[in-house]
Amino acid sequence: IQDAAVVLDMMRKPIKLLFFVCLWYFFNMQYNVGNKQLLQSLGAPLAIAWVQLASGIIMAAGMWMCRFPLPSLSRDEMWKLMPTGVVFALGQAATVMSLATGSVSLTHAIKSLEPAVNALFSAMFLGQSSHPLTYASLIPLIFGVVLTTASHVRFSQYSLGYAMLSNMC
């Protein structure tokens, strides 16, 4: 019984991680489908992206007005973070543009390359390299995306470009 308790305790963290990854995936798909439905009914992808980003600012301001802890950042630190915020906003707009110019499945497949893009950019720009097996684990992902994209019925080069721009942001 004690061994079973130890095994169960060891399994909690991976199961919890798997649960949250699946939860993130579910909400990410809901977000993409919701965006596509909104784009089909309203159009105006950049306006939709702007409203989504602005609503986040409004929610943060509301949280601060309700006395949630404020971040303790100096003006200099805020200016240092500004480029990150701009790149994040560009990535958000690129995702919405990808959904506007292609199908949800194509955008979602291309966006799944984000770990490979992060690994490549970390090595190129930050000088941070991972274990070769980490890179090898990305090969099936890359081939899967290439096969999916190449055989996609409603392929759009614009959707591909915007989704890859979003991956890079």
Image (spheres, helix red, strand yellow):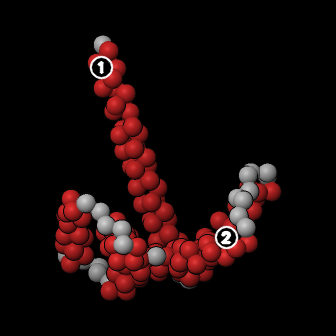
Q: Which numbered circle lies on residue 4?
A: 1
Q: Position of residue 5 (x, y in %)?
A: 34, 20
Residue at 33% in and 23% down: 6
Q: Nearer the viewer, residue 78 or 102?
A: 78
Q: For the residue carrying disc 2, how many other residues have a C-alpha within 10 Å: few (<14), some (14-19), or many (20+)?
A: few
Q: Secondary structure beneath disc 1?
A: helix
Point out residue 33 in the picture as x, y percentages from the top left corner: 45, 65
> Among all residues in the image, which is located at the extreme front?
127
Q: Is residue 109 left or right of residue 146?
A: right
Q: Residue at x 37, y 84 (%)?
A: 161
Q: Quadrant of the N terminus?
A: top left
Q: Earlier in the sequence, mark 2 or mark 1?
A: 1
Crowd tier of the residue under label 1, counting other residues whose Cα lies within 10 Å: few below 14, some 14–19, many 20 or above:
few
Against 58, residue 158 (above or below) is below
Left or right placement of residue 101 versus residue 79 in this view: left
- Which three-letter amino acid code belongs to the residue tagged 1? Ala
Q: Callout 2, which amino acid? A: Glu
| Total numbered circles | 2
> Mark 2 and 1 residues: CB-CB less than 8 Å, in contact?
no
- What residue would you read off at disc 2? 77
x, y percent for residue 164: 37, 78
For this rendering, which residue is in front, 85 or 131? 131
Residue at x-position 72% and y-position 59%: 72
Relative to 166, say whether 72 is above or below.
above
From mark 2 to mark 1, how far is it between C-alphas? 49 Å
Decide: is 32 above or below 16. Answer: below
Report the residue at 60% width, 81% height from top: 47
